[in-house]
Every structure is written in structure tokens, then in C-alpha cells.
């Protein structure tokens, strides 16, 4: 099985930077995804890491350390619309494109 | 870009009835689609992998006879919740990827909120 842990809730201020951590334990690791999900809507893709290091995409960056089973999603210049749930998901060699998700981190951005 | 369409968006039904949810890939052919379930404030849990032209692969604990999956064509997979009960009330969502595409080209449907009375 796979254990994927991330904080349940976080609060940050508009314009600030927030880091959402994710740790995982799995065999046959084949990539880590971050998705954003607003309530009652489909998840939308944010990032994908398969190699160690930092991937930057505009205001969003994602980091991966395979040896530590650790990833984080960094959101810069927070906007009110960034209030959402952020899902960490892992793909394994056996699972292919069937992802295993963490429970998600609910981020609240305040004025 | 590739889009996955899911229908209906929400459904309310009486206990004991069956509900069919459709998942379509609109501009690509999907040999494999995935069905997830999400309870309030919980994450997405994989229910089954739908394979075109063959039987679905179910995750442990998911009843095959209750959640019927049919993937009769390369663009359509259906999930039928048979004899639905209140505990089946949940958000059901599908995903699909165009074969050969990058990992980031894994798209989700808009989800179906099922409420069983």
C-alpha cells in the first residue's frame, strides 16, 4: 500500500507565499502530481515531478526528493482565488496512470 | 486540448434504484479510464480501472456487482451504481489520458454528485 500524508488545513494571507508539504511511502515510484480542486469540481493539473529537484511554473513550483519521499508545492503571490484543496498524488510503475491521492490540504487565503 | 466529459453533473435517486454515469473522451481515444469516489472532505479514492473491450479491474473493497463498469468504445466508459443506498452518496469522478501523451495530459471529468434518498 501507499501512505501519502499532507496537512489537512492551512491558512495564508493574500500576497504571501505558502508551502504545502507531502510525504509518501511507496514502492515502484513513478511520479508525483499536484492538483488543485475547488469544491464540487474536477481536479486541475498543477505539476508533475519524476526527478529530484524543483519545477517552476509561474506562481506555482513543486519540489521532489525521492530519497526522502518528500515533495512540496510552493504558491507565491497568493490570490483569493487560490483558496482550494491541493491534492498530492503518486503514480507507481504498477498503477500507471491510476493515481493514489493524499487526503488533500484545504488552503484558505485571507485578505 | 483533450477534454473528458462526465454526465450527469448531479443526480438524486431513491434507495434501491440504479444510476448510470457516463464518461466520454471528447477529442481523443482512451483505452483506459479510471473511476474515483470522493466523500466530503476526503480525497479521491480509486474504485476501478476501466479497460476498453475487457473487464474492469476493481480495487480491493469495491464490489464488482454493485459498481458495474462498461467500456464498450474507445471514447465512452459508464459506471452504473446498482441498487443504490444512502451510503453510496458521494462524488464520482472519472479520468482518462490520451495514449502516448505526457503525464500532465491526464484529464478529469467534472464529476457527478450522487445523492441517494
Image (cartoon, rainbow, N blue to C red):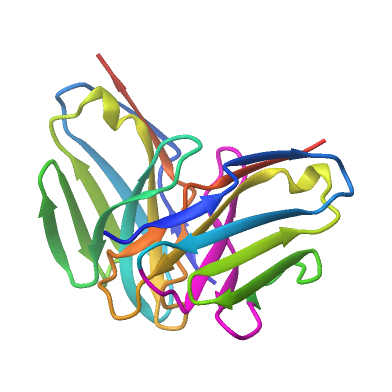
Residue A1 visible somewhere in the drawing? yes
Residue B59 visible somewhere in the drawing? no
User: Which residue is rendered at x = 28% and y = 32% of the image?
Assistant: A82
User: Which residue is rendered at x = 20% and y = 44% of the image?
Assistant: A74
Numbered circles on residues, count: 0
Q: What range of the chain is rendered magenta?
A: B28-56
**Residue B78 at x, y = what percent?**
63, 64
Q: Quadrant of the C terminus of chain A?
A: top left
Give the residue at the far right of this rendering. Answer: B16
Seen from the viewer's position, the closer of residues A98 and A91 is: A98
Taking the magenta stretch, the answer to whether it contains residue B36 is yes
User: Which residue is rendered at x = 40% and y = 48% of the image?
Assistant: A43
Give the residue at the far bottom of this rendering. Answer: B54
Q: Quadrant of the N terminus of chain A?
A: bottom right
**Residue A57 at x, y = what percent?**
12, 51
**Residue B16 at x, y = what percent?**
89, 49
Taking the magenta stretch, the answer to whether it contains residue B99 is no
Describe residue B100's horizontal placement relative to residue A1 as left or right.
left
Is A16 above or below relative to B81? above
Describe residue B16's horizontal placement relative to residue A71 as left or right.
right
Residue A83, image quadrant: top left
User: Which residue is rendered at x = 35% and y = 73% of the image?
Assistant: B98
Seen from the viewer's position, the closer of residues B32 and A78 is: B32
Is A39 above or below relative to B36? above
Seen from the viewer's position, the closer of residues A106 and B74 is: B74
Seen from the viewer's position, the closer of residues A22 and B79 is: B79
Residue A16, image quadrant: top left
Is A23 above or below relative to B111? below
**Residue B77 at x, y = what percent?**
58, 68
Amino acid at each position: 500500500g501507499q501512505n501519502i500524508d499532507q496537512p489537512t488545513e492551512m491558512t495564508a494571507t493574500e500576497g504571501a507565499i505558502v508551502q504545502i508539504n507531502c510525504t509518501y511511502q511507496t514502492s515502484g515510484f513513478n511520479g508525483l502530481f499536484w492538483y488543485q480542486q475547488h469544491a464540487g469540481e474536477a481536479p486541475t493539473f498543477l505539476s508533475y515531478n519524476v526527478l529530484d529537484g524543483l519545477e517552476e511554473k509561474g506562481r506555482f513550483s513543486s519540489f521532489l526528493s525521492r530519497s526522502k519521499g518528500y515533495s512540496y508545492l510552493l504558491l507565491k503571490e497568493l490570490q483569493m482565488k487560490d483558496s482550494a484543496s491541493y491534492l498530492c498524488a503518486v503514480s507507481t510503475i504498477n498503477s500507471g496512470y491510476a493515481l493514489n491521492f493524499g487526503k488533500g490540504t484545504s488552503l484558505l487565503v485571507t485578505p | 486540448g483533450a477534454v473528458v466529459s462526465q454526465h450527469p453533473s448531479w443526480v438524486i435517486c431513491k434507495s434501491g434504484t440504479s444510476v448510470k454515469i457516463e464518461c466520454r473522451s471528447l477529442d481523443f481515444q482512451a483505452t483506459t479510464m479510471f473511476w474515483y469516489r470522493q466523500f466530503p472532505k476526503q480525497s479521491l479514492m480509486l474504485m476501478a480501472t476501466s479497460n476498453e473491450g475487457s473487464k474492469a479491474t476493481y480495487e480491493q473493497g469495491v464490489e464488482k456487482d454493485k459498481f458495474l463498469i462498461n467500456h464498450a468504445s474507445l471514447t465512452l466508459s459508464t459506471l452504473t451504481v446498482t441498487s443504490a443506498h444512502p451510503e453510496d452518496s458521494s462524488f464520482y469522478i472519472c479520468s482518462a489520458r490520451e495514449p502516448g501523451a505526457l503525464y500532465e495530459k491526464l484529464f478529469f471529468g467534472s464529476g457527478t454528485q450522487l445523492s441517494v434518498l
